[in-house]
Image (tube, helix red, strand yellow):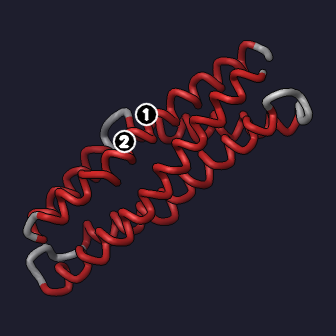
Amino acid sequence: MNMLTEALLWFALISAGLMAGLYFAFSVFIMYALAALDHPAGMQAMNAINFVIQRTIFLPLFFASTAASMVLCLIALINWGAPGTAALLLGGILYVVGMSGVTIAGNVPLNNALASAAPRSLPGHTMWLEYCRRWTRLNHVRTIACTAALALFVLAEARL
C-alpha cells in the first residue's frame, strides 16, 4: 500500500469514528432530550444546533471524509483482488451512501423544513413530532453506517 492510500485510509477511519460518535450521541440521548422539551423549545434548540454545526469543523470533515471514502472506493476497484480491497470498497460505499447520502437526501431537507416552521403553532408542533421521528430514524442509519464503515476500514488497514 502506498503512503497516499495509507493516509487516506487512516483519515477515513478516524473520520468514520468521529462521525459515528456524533451520530450515536444524537441517536441515544440528544434527540430524546430535545423531544422531551416543550415543542417550541425543542425546535429552537435543534435549529440552533443546525445553525452552529454548519459553522464548525463538522462541514469540512463531512465533505473531506466523503471525498476520501470515494477515493478509497476507486483505489479498491483499481486494486481489486488484493488483500483488504473488499473491506475497503464496502466501507467506502457504506460511508458515502449511509452517512453522506442519508444526510444530504434525508436529514438536511428535514432540517430546512424545521427552520421554516413556526415553533408556536399547531402545524409547527405537528411538524416537530414528525421531524423527531423521521430525523432520528435516519440518524440511526447514519450511526450504523459510520460504525460499520469504521470496522471495515480497520479490517482493510489490517489486511492491506
Is the residue under label 1 in contact with that under label 2 (CB below 8 Å)? yes
| Left or right of 72, for residue 67 | left
Disc 1, SS: helix
Q: Crowding near pointer 1: few (<14 within 10 Å), some, many (20+)?
A: some
Residue 78 at x, y percent in the picture: 88, 34
Residue furthest out toward the top: 3
Count of numbered marks: 2
Which amino acid does the dot numbered 2 rest on? Leu
User: Is residue 110 depicted above or below 100 in this figure?
Assistant: below
Which amino acid does the dot numbered 1 rest on? Leu
Q: Residue at point 12% right, 83% down?
A: 121
| Left or right of 154, for residue 40 | left
For label 1, the residue is: 18
| Left or right of 81, for residue 9 | left
Residue 24 at x, y percent in the picture: 38, 46
Name which quarter of the figure residue 98 lies in: bottom right
Q: Residue at point 41% right, 61% down?
A: 108
CA distance separating discs 2 and 1: 6 Å
For label 2, the residue is: 22
Residue 69 at x, y percent in the picture: 65, 38
- The C terminus: image quadrant: top right
- The N terminus: image quadrant: top right
Q: Residue at point 63% right, 34% down?
A: 68
Name which quarter of the figure residue 136 lies in: bottom left
Name which quarter of the figure residue 7 lies in: top right
